[in-house]
């Protein structure tokens, strides 16, 4: 916890050097949906009843009479007797209300292509896709894996599943086909929806060919034609998405489903090598995602243009690209590409072009833009922006201030939103018209959420909330043991935090073995087991090292088999080995050859000491170390490596 204290001091200092509170402007407050403490107060008086009230904003085929059922805690149920359908709430409801021609997504392709995706178009495509899935034998409760880039079809694929009660399992396009295979196997997916090729910075990756190469264990695949990849083999179990949709019946009414019907599975890193299949259900998830999207972003759907830069393959994409915005009939910008292609100002170009009013992005992207320099921002007119959001990791006050000044023109409140794949929706932040922001602090628990910090500095959520995960797929015991180690009433988030005198939470990072690289969660155990799977490797220990750009980066200490010697060629080989197994973002930034690893007398690797050397800090307590000499040797090697890497 020592590092955590230093970090906190640094942040406090940075906050004091500037101003430490940023209230919304009078103009923002005057127009805000929530401009005072009334929502917090109403929810505090009776949180369960308050959530029942918020659920009424949705369309229910049968309105729930029950709200929270804690009979089987920590397996909580919300609105269990209600009947609902997510795609109905995201599409039919708006089209019936006359909003069919409203743009749901201004889709912008890498090469500047534009598509205006309306609610009517999404509804039409979703019904056809749902019928196409049925024709492939997909039934209610079946799992459908989705491995697609940021294209409108990914939204259609997700909503088509929900329409018929199938459960989607979206795998981030940056993960390797090996990872997709592992997730397909673990979730027992019958069908995979994928793409011919994915475009990335002017190049095309042959996705379908790569999927075939690993031997994907699904009965059928649907393939979206997007990149016109020449390398796209099609066999008997494959069908083209556009042909299947054209052949499908146009009408597929949304099925009324129980509120606790599974909506999706999303895999997340844990402290073992096995990713956790986080399961979310329908009614509670949609209630909280819709409420938070509307009120945290102060959304006026008839005039706002909202841009969330997250990929749909992460929870932020699920909740705040797809379900929240669509449930609220919002108009969004959806961008296929990377923030630096075709140029480093492309996000700001999109903000100007589409008149973006609300921007939601991650600290790692903000730091990259800061580094690229103001000239990429200043070329564009950002005067339509009125609110900024941040998610994924703690935002350092310096980056916060830059975001507020250079992007927000000192005019836009910044909401720093703390939440997790497990929480489903935002749980800690400031309501922008009602609360001041403090750079570096995420703010307070939202209405209906109770959070606190334990004596040993851990953040807990102290009451169930509607969008919480319901279980880990196939492993309810791991669910209870991981998140409720002290009993059903207290959810342990796995983050260290401090709370200040105003009740604001200061998040200090993960306490388990999860590394957050550019806001993407990776498990040390998963990366270690990928490295150890290489035939030349005997043992490996993976830790996070501080990184100015990505927040954290992966450092790997690797012991080779026998008397093999490590060299630069093997570094490259191991890095591409990890990229193949997990994905490029899991590649270690630094690999250090270690003859031995620091271990306790009982043989446990002491990652704490490895973190100290990776960051060049004084070593912490070494008294339990079996072979103290190991550390001197490693220190020397890390120093050599730093010199060789030029930092
Ligand atoms: C971290 C992403 C500080 C945290 C939505 C959490 C944050 C993990 C913030 C979840 C924030 C996310 N301030 N830390 N505003 N937002 N985190 O599951 O460590 O990808 O536990 O969900 O990201 O990451 P996940």
Image (spheres, grey):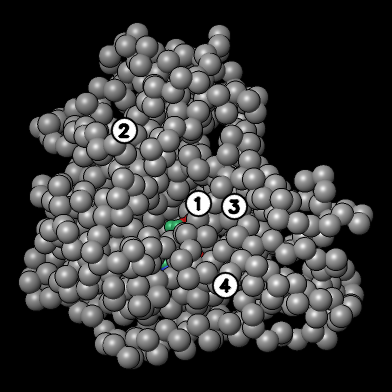
Label 3: few (<14), some (14–19) or many (≥20) C-alpha neighbours in 10 Å: many
Residue 602 position by quadrant: bottom right
Q: Is residue 68 visible?
A: no
Label 2 or label 3, whichever comes before in sequence order: 2
Residue 286 vs residue 61, the one in the foreground = 286
Q: Residue at x 50, y 43 (%)?
A: 174
Q: What is the C-alpha distance between the residues marked 4 and 2? A: 42 Å
- Disc 4 designates what residue? 647
Q: Where does the C terminus fall, quadrant-wise?
A: bottom right
Tag 2, which secondary structure? helix
Tag 4, which secondary structure? loop
Residue 446 vs residue 369, the one in the foreground = 369
Label 3 or label 4, whichever comes before in sequence order: 3
Tag 3, which secondary structure? helix
* Residue 469, numbered circle: 1
Q: From the viewer's perspective, is the residue at label 4 or at label 2 nearer?
A: 4
Q: From the viewer's perspective, is the residue at label 1 or at label 3 nearer?
A: 3
- Disc 2 designates what residue? 152
Q: Is residue 483 left or right of residue 598?
A: left
Label 2 or label 1, whichever comes before in sequence order: 2
* Residue 586, numbered circle: 3
Q: Is residue 168 left or right of residue 644?
A: left
Label 4 or label 2, whichever comes before in sequence order: 2
Q: What is the C-alpha distance between the residues marked 3 and 4? A: 21 Å
């Amino acid at each position: 916890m020592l590092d955590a204290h230093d970090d906190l001091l640094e942040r406090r200092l940075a906050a004091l050097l500037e101003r430490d509170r940023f209230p919304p402007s009078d103009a923002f407050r005057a127009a805000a949906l929530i401009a005072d403490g009334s929502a917090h107060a109403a929810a505090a008086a009776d949180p369960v009843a308050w959530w029942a009230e918020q659920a009424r904003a949705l369309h229910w085929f049968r309105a729930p009479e029950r709200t929270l059922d804690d009979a089987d805690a920590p397996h909580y149920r919300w609105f269990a007797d209600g009947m609902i359908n997510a795609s109905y709430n995201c599409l039919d409801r708006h089209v019936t209300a006359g909003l069919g021609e409203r743009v749901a997504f201004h889709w912008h392709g890498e090469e500047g292509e534009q598509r205006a995706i309306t609610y009517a178009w999404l509804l039409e495509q979703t019904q056809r896709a749902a019928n196409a899935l049925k024709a492939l034998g997909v039934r209610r409760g079946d799992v459908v894996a989705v491995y697609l880039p940021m294209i409108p079809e990914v939204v259609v694929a997700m909503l088509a599943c929900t329409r018929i009660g199938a459960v989607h399992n979206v795998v981030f396009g940056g993960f390797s086909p090996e990872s997709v295979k592992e997730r397909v196997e673990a979730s027992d997916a019958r069908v995979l929806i994928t793409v011919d090729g994915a475009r990335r910075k002017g190049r095309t990756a042959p996705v379908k060919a790569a999927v075939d190469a690993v031997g994907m264990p699904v009965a059928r695949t649907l393939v979206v034609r997007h990149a016109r990849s020449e390398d796209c083999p099609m066999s008997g179990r494959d069908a083209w998405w556009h042909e299947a949709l054209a052949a499908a019946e146009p009408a597929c009414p949304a099925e009324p489903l129980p509120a606790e019907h599974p909506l999706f599975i999303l895999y997340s890193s844990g402290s073992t090598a096995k990713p956790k299949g986080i399961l979310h259900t329908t009614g509670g998830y949609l209630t909280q995602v819709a409420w938070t999207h509307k009120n945290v972003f102060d959304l006026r759907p008839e005039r706002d243009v909202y841009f969330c830069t997250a990929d749909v393959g992460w929870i932020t994409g699920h909740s705040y690209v797809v379900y929240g915005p669509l449930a609220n009939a919002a108009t969004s910008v959806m961008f296929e590409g990377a923030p630096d292609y075709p140029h480093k100002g492309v996000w700001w170009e999109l903000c100007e072009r589409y008149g973006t009013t609300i921007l939601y992005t991650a600290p790692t992207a903000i730091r990259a833009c800061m580094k690229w320099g103001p000239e990429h921002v200043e070329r564009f007119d950002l005067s339509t922006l009125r609110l900024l959001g941040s998610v994924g990791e703690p935002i350092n006050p310096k980056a916060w201030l830059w975001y507020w000044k250079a992007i927000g023109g000192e005019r836009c409140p910044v909401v720093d939103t703390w939440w997790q794949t497990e929480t489903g929706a935002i749980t800690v932040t400031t309501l922008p018209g009602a609360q001041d922001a403090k750079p570096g602090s995420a703010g307070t628990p939202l209405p209906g959420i109770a959070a606190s910090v334990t004596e040993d500095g851990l953040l807990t959520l102290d009451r169930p909330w509607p969008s919480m995960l319901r279980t880990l797929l196939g492993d309810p015991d791991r669910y209870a043991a991981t998140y409720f180690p002290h009993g059903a009433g207290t959810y342990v988030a796995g983050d260290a935090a401090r709370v200040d005198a105003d009740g604001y939470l200061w998040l200090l990072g993960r306490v388990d073995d999860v590394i957050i690289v550019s806001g993407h969660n990776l498990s040390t155990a998963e990366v270690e087991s990928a490295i150890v799977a290489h035939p030349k490797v005997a043992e490996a220990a993976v830790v996070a090292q501080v990184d100015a750009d990505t927040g954290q980066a992966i450092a790997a200490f690797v012991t080779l088999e026998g008397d093999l010697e490590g060299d630069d060629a093997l570094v490259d080989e191991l890095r591409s080995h990890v990229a193949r197994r997990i994905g490029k973002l899991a590649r270690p930034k630094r690999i250090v050859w270690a003859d031995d690893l620091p271990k306790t007398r009982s043989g446990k690797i002491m990652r704490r000491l490895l973190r100290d050397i990776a960051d060049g800090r004084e070593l912490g307590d070494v008294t339990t170390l079996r072979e103290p000499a190991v550390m001197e040797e490693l220190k020397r090697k890390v120093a050599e490596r730093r010199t060789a890497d030029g930092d």
